[in-house]
Image (cartoon, helix red, strand yellow):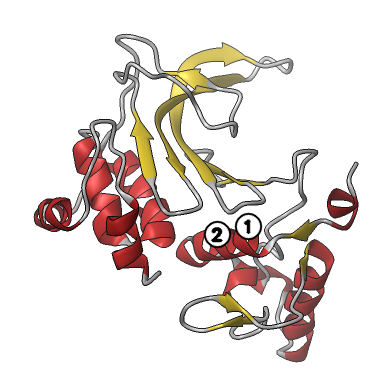
Amino acid sequence: MTGQNQNHEYSFPQFRSALRLARAFGHGWAEVPDSFGLSAPTDHPISGARWTMVLVEELYRAIGRRDRWESWQYGLPSPGPLDHGGCTHHVSTTGRLEWRVAPDGAVGVVVCRPGDPYLNEHGVERHRSVVVLSASVDPDGGVEIRTPDTRDHRIPDVHAATWSPVGGPRAEARHGDALREALAALVGDVPACAALRAAGVCWSDGASLVEAGEAGEAGEVGEAGEVGEAGAASASGA
């Protein structure tokens, strides 16, 4: 293992992406105000700041002790450990959403739904997860979305599940909502909606279709749902 993996020290781009996602989804550690060596509102690093799993967890738990939280008040205490490639992972409680954050801040996201049933080793019926949406966000804010009907069936390296088969489960509005929330946290809502619209993905808020159309004029959108860097930067304040 590398020294970074041994210490579970996150790079600044990686920590910033993980923090933005965690804020959007209400993870406990991300709700600690002004405590991670990042200057609001741009999340630029303060000189000398470091981010390791142990430091983040210690800070979070210290605030809990100070404010005398009950055990049920604690949430996730950190972005989690780094794998052998230096990436951090998160899977939602329901298993619907999973993301992977690389050291350069790039993010892979998959949205899953239950597939065919099977019996586990205890004879209990379970459902295999199948991927119905995936997205990649590069370090510059470019977004690429894939669906089961997309010719390019690459899946970000975040999940062992496979794409939903022909005639199998497809994404519904709630799945588009989950992906939109993750993308909006990283690049801003307007570029997120533009990428979803370009990829033919539906989501619940019909008013956002207007926003997405306006974003298409401001930031060029590619055929596979890829938003240009200019459009993403304008919405993220970069």
Q: Position of residue 188 (x, y in %)?
A: 33, 62
Q: Is residue 192 left or right of residue 47?
A: left
Relative to 127, residue 205 above or below: below
**Mark 2 belongs to which amino acid?**
Ser
Q: Which mark is residue 17?
A: 2
Q: Is residue 105 left or right of residue 166?
A: right
Residue at x-position 11% and y-position 57%: 214
Q: Is residue 75 left or right of residue 26?
A: right
Which one is in front, 93 or 3?
3
Which one is in front, 209 or 11?
11
Q: Residues within 10 Å of mark 2 (few under 14, many from 20)?
A: many
Q: Secondary structure at mark 2?
A: helix
Where, by quadrant of the figure, is residue 98 drawn?
Answer: top right
The quarter of the rendered structure image containing the C terminus is bottom left
Relative to 81, residue 145 above or below: above
Residue at x-position 47% and y-position 22%: 154
Furthest-top residue in this view:
166
Using the rendered image of the protein, determine whether residue 202 is visible from the camera's viewpoint: no
The residue that mark 1 highlights is 14
